Amino acid sequence: MGAPAVDTRPSVEDVAMVALDAGRLALEAGASGRTVAELVERTARGLGAERVDLRIGYASLAVTIGIGGDGITRMRRVGPHGVNQRLDAALRALAARVSRGELDHAATRVALERLPRDTPGQPAWFVAAAVGLACAAFGRLLGVDWHGSVPVFLASTLGQALRGFLLARRANVFLAVNVVAFSSSLLAGLGARWAGSDTMDGAMIAAVLLLVPGVPALNALNDILEGRPTLGSARAVFVVVVLIFVTVGIGLGKTFLGEAR
């Protein structure tokens, strides 16, 4: 008699945890709820799952996986949400490979552990300079004169560098927003006043446009319209609170400059 065949299929536990890891990374990278759901389902089914039920929350993910007569429910905590399009695209490509059967659960787990390291962002100095240039350009569109545009560029560049510094040290995201809004608006206002700009107020506003949470706002709307009101509402609340702290930071900067109305 030959040796009994060894079952190399992944367990329900293995499938659930790998699928949750993929979903967690996508949510932290700023993916919409629909993208997260599609990625988790493709990953789980590619690893042998027959039934996939996912609950997406702002701070956690829960999935129920079924294979044959076996089923399991697992939950995973989600870290701070950011925006990382490179990681998002890499996760989609990985899920496509898994769905085609090119990777087993062990290889998929290793790939998920390596993806954040293998998809680094742009250098911090480049991001800061690009943000400064974008804010200065938006300032021009908003009517800021040329004398105020240079201070906007410098203030928003320094503001982005400060935001990166604070978030890298795990500062509270809302406190970081408030500090950056105050610093950037104050520097832009001082620079515009020194340069003789007639649009100091516009310069102060343009310098904090880097803090506008555009991706979370768009995701909040998409999630609500696509039938995920819990996730969408949580994201909408985040957007509103960020905007409140931005407004407070600008107000403090105006007060400091004696420009409060």
Image (cartoon, rainbow, N blue to C red):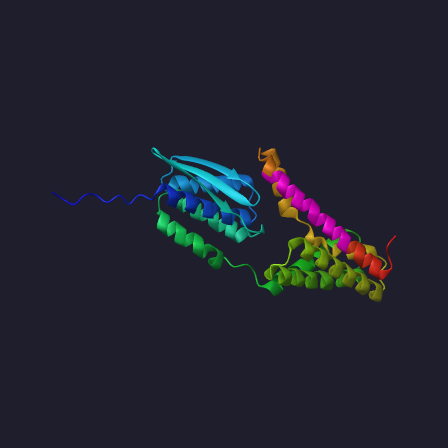
Q: Determine if residue 225 is in view.
A: yes
Q: What residue do we see at 87% from left, 59% from top?
A: 258
Give residue 27's position: percent from left, percent from top.
54, 46
Residue 64 covered by magenta stretch: no
**Residue 205 can be seen, yes or no:** no
Residue range corresponding to the magenta coloring: 231-249
Q: How many numbered marks appear?
A: 0
Quarter holding the N terminus is: top left
Q: Residue at x 54, y 49 (%)?
A: 28
Left or right: residue 105 compared with residue 254: left
Q: Estimate the x, y position of residue 33 in percent, counting from the top left.
A: 55, 40
Estimate the x, y position of residue 129 in percent, counting from the top left.
65, 62
Which image quadrant is residue 47 in?
Answer: top left
Q: Residue 236 lies in magenta, yes or no?
A: yes
Quarter assignment of residue 8: top left
- Name the residue rendered at 72%, 64% in the picture: 154
Q: Taking 183 as reference, is 80 above or below it?
A: above
Q: Which SS type dominates the magenta stretch?
A: helix
Question: Residue at image x 65%, y 47%?
Answer: 214
- Asked whether, in this view, residue 200 is left or right of residue 76, the answer is right
Q: Nearer the viewer, residue 95 or 240?
A: 240
- Where's residue 170, x and y in %? 60, 59
168 up-or-down from 83: above or below = below
